[in-house]
Amino acid sequence: MYKLLSHNDLDGVGCGILAKIAFDNQVQVRYNSIGSLNREVEYFLENDQNDTFLLITDLSVNEENEKKLQTFYQGGGKVQLLDHHKTALHFNEYEWGSVKVEDEQNRLTSATSLLYQYLLSNNHITPSKAIDEFVELVRQYDTWEWERNNNLQAKRLNTLFFLISIDEFVDKMINKLSSDEHFEFDTFEKQILEMEEQKIERYINRKKRQVTQVELNNKYAGVVYAESYHSELGNELGKEYPHLDYIVILNISGKRMGFRTIHDDVDVSEIAGYYGGGGHEKASGATMTDEAFKQFVIETFQQEHLREDAKRNRFNQKQSSFGTLYRNQKNDKFLIYPTNEKWKVERNNHDMEQIYTNFEDAERFLKRNEQVWMERDDAFVQYLMEQVKGQ
């Protein structure tokens, strides 16, 4: 008999799907939040049969349960922990622990991909093209490779996961992977996914206008309140406001925080770790602490929201030889313009001291320090006319 304790996100549930395909009715699966895993492990150690094989995937236990599992293993108990978060690497010190952040091809791993390899190597599961494709979709979504590869199929799989209950999702996936040659969405699934994607787009567009900016430890964060679509929202807000190092998504009712970044030089798992959480370099989470509530809620509540750059401009465009016009909440006007293969900034018709080697650095400085937004064409044309009249 097997017992699988896994995370309650797509990657964790992907492990449950593989376990059920491999062991059928000989496995009991329970999906956990980060906080509930340790209670489940304690219950297992106190109540389950000694011959039950414990599998833990996509999550790691606290220090107390770490010691208990080692004692359980040394006493003849069967346990295997599989994880891919670098915060869990110390579990490799145990014979029952296996944590791999990257595979042999230097690709980021997921818990689902690690469990699949474990099941294959122990002859517990028969490989198929459909299972291979499913595991890769989960891996790409969980590691954010889907965004770089523009793999919308992976994104859609996660969307479907949140549209239906976990039990229904598991049954659907097991049926697909057991009967279909390739992994594909059926006609009904495609229809509901299209409807949901339109709903997500409207939600994200609304949230783009509700971001506040905060500086902490020499990094700039965008703070937004949201209870839904955290992955999609964090990704789109990062692209809308690339001057921000990371996005903080606050679920007040759930007392949870999500951290997302699109930048390779920012590791949000370190930021989440400061608040007792963890995760991936590009996507992590934590429980909202009193300190976090003060920093991200109280200290930003009275701030103005960031303004989006004007869309569909024909004249006031970035890196224009005429310059690019910005404005801030104080109604100050800033013009970034080229000069001698460098870039300068003019504030209310007066040159600022700093000279920049590229346009991006100049814009980044203004957005971080002045919270500017790019003006629409009509304001830009009016500005140019005023300049001509003033000469």
Image: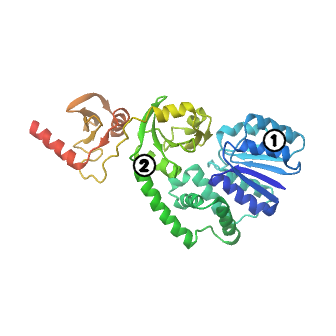
Is 175 rendered above or below residue 18?
A: below
Where residue 98 appears, as percent x and y from the top left, is 74, 44
Where does label 2 land, which residue? 207
Is 163 rendered above or below residue 142?
A: below
Residue 46 occupies quadrant? top right
Badge 2, how many Cα within 10 Å: few under 14, some, many 20+? some
Relative depth, front residue between 343 and 270: 270
Q: Secondary structure at mark 1?
A: loop
Where residue 305 appears, as percent x and y from the top left, is 38, 40
Specify the quadrant that holds the C terminus.
top left
Residue farthest to the front, as pictured: 253
- For residue 115, the mark is none
- For residue 95, the mark is 1
**Which label sits in the foreground, 1 or 2?**
2
Q: Secondary structure at mark 2?
A: helix
Amino acid tagged 1: Glu
Is 293 rendered above or below residue 10?
A: above
